[in-house]
Image: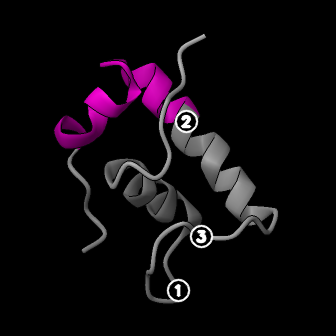
């Protein structure tokens, strides 16, 4: 359940692995600081996994500009 293929979510970050990593790390930091989760997920899951799952479900996305 925790494995998320990069090939399936790279398009969410403008086809850039660098942008995907930045997006996921920023969201994981927000979660660590207490921001609410945007998806239903069991407890004990790491913030980085939650961030990647949110990106894969389209709840968090890369904004051009």
Q: What residue is rendered at 62% in x and 49% in y?
A: 27
Give the total of numbered labels. 3
Left or right: 6 as drawn, with respect to 44: left
Label annotation for residue 37: 3
Answer whether residue 12 is magenta in the image: yes
Answer whether residue 21 is magenta in the image: yes
Q: What residue is rendered at 44% in x and 57% in y?
A: 54
Rate crowding at label 1 as few (under 14), some (14 to 19) or many (20 or more) other CA atoms within 10 Å.
few
Q: Disc 3 or 1, which lies upstream in sequence? A: 3
Res 13 quadrant in image: top left
Q: Estimate the spatial distance between the alpha carbons at disc 3 and disc 1, rounded to whole Å.
A: 13 Å
Callout 2 secondary element: helix
Which color scheme did the rendering employ for the protein? one colour
Residue 38 location in percent, x, y? Answer: 54, 66
Residue 10 location in percent, x, y? Answer: 29, 31
Label annotation for residue 23: 2
Magenta part, dominant SS: helix
Relative to 15, does residue 45 appear above or below in the rendering?
Answer: below
* Nearest to viewer (mark 3 / mark 2): 3
Which segment did they paint magenta? 6-22
Outermost residue, top side: 65
Left or right: 30 as drawn, with respect to 17: right
Residue 22 location in percent, x, y? Answer: 57, 31
* Nearest to viewer (mark 2 / mark 1): 2
Relative to 3, does residue 8 appear above or below in the rendering?
Answer: above
Label annotation for residue 44: 1
Callout 3 secondary element: loop
Q: Disc 3 or 2, which lies upstream in sequence? A: 2
């Amino acid at each position: 359940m925790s494995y998320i293929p990069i090939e399936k979510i790279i398009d969410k970050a403008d086809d850039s692995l660098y942008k995907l990593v930045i997006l996921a790390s920023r969201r994981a930091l927000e979660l660590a600081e207490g921001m609410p989760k945007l998806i239903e997920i069991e407890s004990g899951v790491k913030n980085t996994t939650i961030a990647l799952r949110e990106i894969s479900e389209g709840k968090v996305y890369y904004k051009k500009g």
